[in-house]
Amino acid sequence: MTRAPANLLALRSLLLTHLDNAPGPDDLEPAEVGIVGDADHRGGYHCGSDRVVTNDYSVVESPRDGAGLTLDAAALDVGGFEVRSAGRTHTLASFSVWCVGQCVANAADTRDIREIIYSPDGTTVKRWDRLGKRTSGDTTHRWHTHFSFFRDAIKAGRDQRPLFRRYLSSIGLLEDNDMTPEEHAWLATVHQNLTLLDGRNPIGQIYTRMALGQDATVSNYKPESPTLTSIAAQVSALQAALTALSGRDFTDEPAIVQGVLAGLTPERIAAAIPPTMAKQVADELARRLVA
């Protein structure tokens, strides 16, 4: 029989964890977040292979669906809510419009979503369809929003929470420290790439340790770890150097290096050196001066 897959159950749990009992006149109730259609439901993404119909659009219109058909349902319905966070009111309509906007922008964490059927105002029903085949839905979508996921993504067990985590973060209901280990690892990679990273600079090192579950809080910082002050100094120095270079045109790497160094005063360089490295730097400079 059609079943609720683990990745959609995890998504359901995420939404209920943060929107059920949230401040406001109408939180999201468990009965309002569904995955599997009722016993009479036939055809569509709420059904698995035992309930699809001939030429079911949720199977035949995309190779991703045909290849991914299993007993798993591949849809999530989210019911109405009205919650307060960060001084603003957030509703099913604003949530739905935000999600559609991310899909229209083709954000990386939306690409497993086939369609969203929703109402932007509680009256008009719209349908965003990645395949461009449909634009409408029935009136029940005035008070609930339907998300369909390509079946191959559900079959592969791919995590569908990142988009919804971003929404909850954007409205202030989820903190960065609620990120999954995979998301911490992704953040570590981003920071490494943004700082010319080969893993040897302090900023790259500290995010790498955070991704591994180390140095997660200030109290866990080890003596050899760069301090928050030194990291802030490095970021400030780098920003100052980039600002100074922004209006200049360089055609080769040595010129770029010289330009960056020109923007780093001795005071900034000294401030950026972690205390545990200071003696090593001093010894190395002394060695070079007498050489």
Image: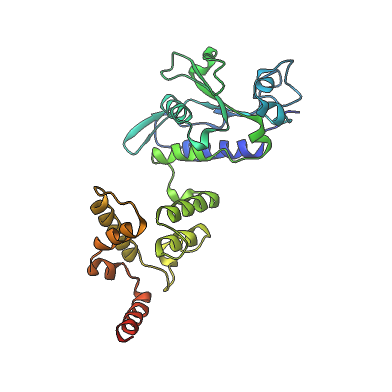
Residue at the front extreme of this rendering: 251
- The furthest residue to the bottom: 290
Q: Pinpoint residue 64: horizontal percent, then vertical percent.
A: 66, 29
Residue placed at 43% from the left, 24% from the top?
A: 93
Q: Position of residue 77 (x, y in %)?
A: 56, 26
Marks counted in the figure total: 0
Residue 235 in sight here:
no
Q: Residue 195's quadrant in the figure?
A: bottom left
Looking at the picture, how far across and down is residue 282, in whole percent?
32, 80
Q: Is residue 267 above or below residue 148?
A: below
Which quarter of the rendered picture does the N terminus lie within? top right
Tell me: 47 left or right of 199. right
Q: Residue at x 53, y 15 (%)?
A: 140
- Residue under the point 44% across and 36% down: 167
Image quarter of the C terminus = bottom left
- Is 135 rendered above or below residue 1? above
Question: Which residue is rendered at x = 47% and y = 62% of the image?
Answer: 199
Q: Quadrant of residue 271?
A: bottom left
Instruction: Give the color scheme: rainbow, by chain, secondary structure or one colour.
Output: rainbow
